[in-house]
Amino acid sequence: MNSGLYINNETDYILVAEDSQVQAKRLQFFFEKSNIRSRFCQNGKDAFEQVLKEKPVLIISDIMMPVMDGYEFCEKVKEVKGMEDVPVILLTSLNNPLDIIKGLQAGADNFITKPYDEEYLLSRIRYLLANRYVRSQGAPDTGIDIMFQGERFHINSSKKQILDLLLSVYEAAMNRNTQLIQAQQQLQLLNDELQAANQELDSFAQTVSHDLRSPLNSILGFAEVIQEDYREVFDKEGEKYIEWIIQSGKGMFELIEKLLEFSRSKKGDVSPAEVNLSEMAAEIASNLQKSVYTGKYDIRIQEGMVTIADPGLMKVVLHNLLGNALKYSEKAGSPEVVFASVRENGKNVFYVQDNGVGFDMNKAGNLLKPFTRLHCDQDYAGSGVGLSTVNQIVLRHGGKVWFESEPGKGSTFYFSLK
């Protein structure tokens, strides 16, 4: 006699209806370990036939099963004379409040949510078996009708049965809530660690960038002096090497600046103010044409585009987007760049469009992440940081960035703000 569970190990057994072989094996191992006799069926129909052959001391049934589900199985068991005192535990995910009503309607005694703890399952079995006699005492209930979600349900369960089942639901909810609190605490810990790591990374990037700029400036300065003052000493090969040094140094200097810009784009306060994007874009495009992209461009900027944003950060956004548009359309026969806006879903959507080289959208999944480039340095120099900086700034304004492109037909980059 297993007195702790009120089970006679020689005659009593627990019946399990479970179609999952994994869950069934787990329960089988649990019962063997606990020295409890058990029988297993893969659906409600087979389990009900087993009930008619040999009365179990307790039933554990999954709800979702083929042939006959757990609700129907439980209801049929409770209708069999002499089976009224057999407790039925339903295994469920309890995703829908209607599960509770259906369980009461079917006459279930307990709910246990999956995944479940073995100790908790054992305590539920012990409780139900120890209190079977309570249900056999007193006059039977006549049943009640209830309305739930506009539908009428007739509940035949006894008051004790209803109380037991509702308490099991409450206990399961409390366990889930405890698990949720623990998960939230773990998530907060991970967020704190991630924030600390990001701060260390930003600090490292700024320190390294600052420490690199000084010696790099010296290298560039001396290389340019050698190129200018010792031009006659070198042959064409030597002149080419000096030019490579200077160009590589300038490329590295630009990358350092972009890294610092990207680092600054992720932190600091956003100071919103009224910004005339049309005037800002015109000034940026003019400066870029004077210093870098001197070709004959057709640049069209829509007038009167005004928004509320951080002026300094928006200047970085437009500088990157317009710079990219000028760069990647430079080799077009008649390069065109457009900066305009449209109204969509009550919001202003700004876009920069070009008729340049474009790219394959199927390869652009990570384009807004740092150091992602779709074109080689030999064709188009760059750091792969500009668009990720744009994305960071727009995200900090509560907006989003997206794009459309096709090889040989140009690109359009959109952004919206909060």
Image (tube, rainbow, N blue to C red):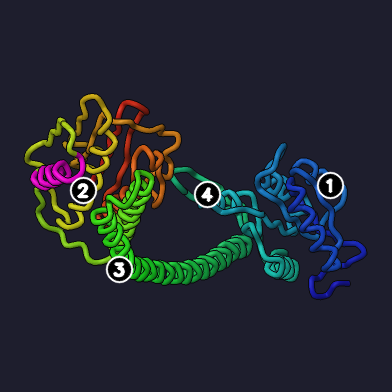
Up the image or down, 3 lies above or below 314; here it is below
Q: Amino acid at mark 3?
A: Ser
**Magenta stretch in the rendered image:** 279-293
Measure the alpha-carbon separation of dots 1 and 3.
Answer: 84 Å
| Residue 187 lies within the magenta run | no
Where residue 320 appears, as percent x and y from the top left, is: 25, 47
N-terminal label among 1 and 3: 1
Up-down relation of residue 191 to residue 103 (above or below): below
Q: Which one is in front, 288 or 218?
A: 218
Count neighbours of disc 1 (C-alpha within 10 A) and say few if under 14, some if 14 to 19, many if 20 or more: some
Q: Which residue is mark 2?
A: 319
Q: Considering the numbered disc 3 on the image, is that residue within a helix, a strand or a loop?
A: helix
Lower position in the chain sequence, tag 3 or tag 4: 4
CA–CA distance between discs 2 and 4?
57 Å
Q: Residue at x 62, y 64 (%)?
A: 164
Residue 288 highlighted magenta (yes or no): yes
Alpha carbons under labels 1 and 2: distance apart: 76 Å
Residue 414 in picture, x, y percent from top left: 26, 40
In the picture of the structure, the residue carrying the numbered disc 4 is 98
In this picture, residue 169 sits left or right of residue 242: right
Task: For mark 2, give the secondary structure.
Answer: helix
Q: CA distance from mark 3 to mark 4?
A: 69 Å
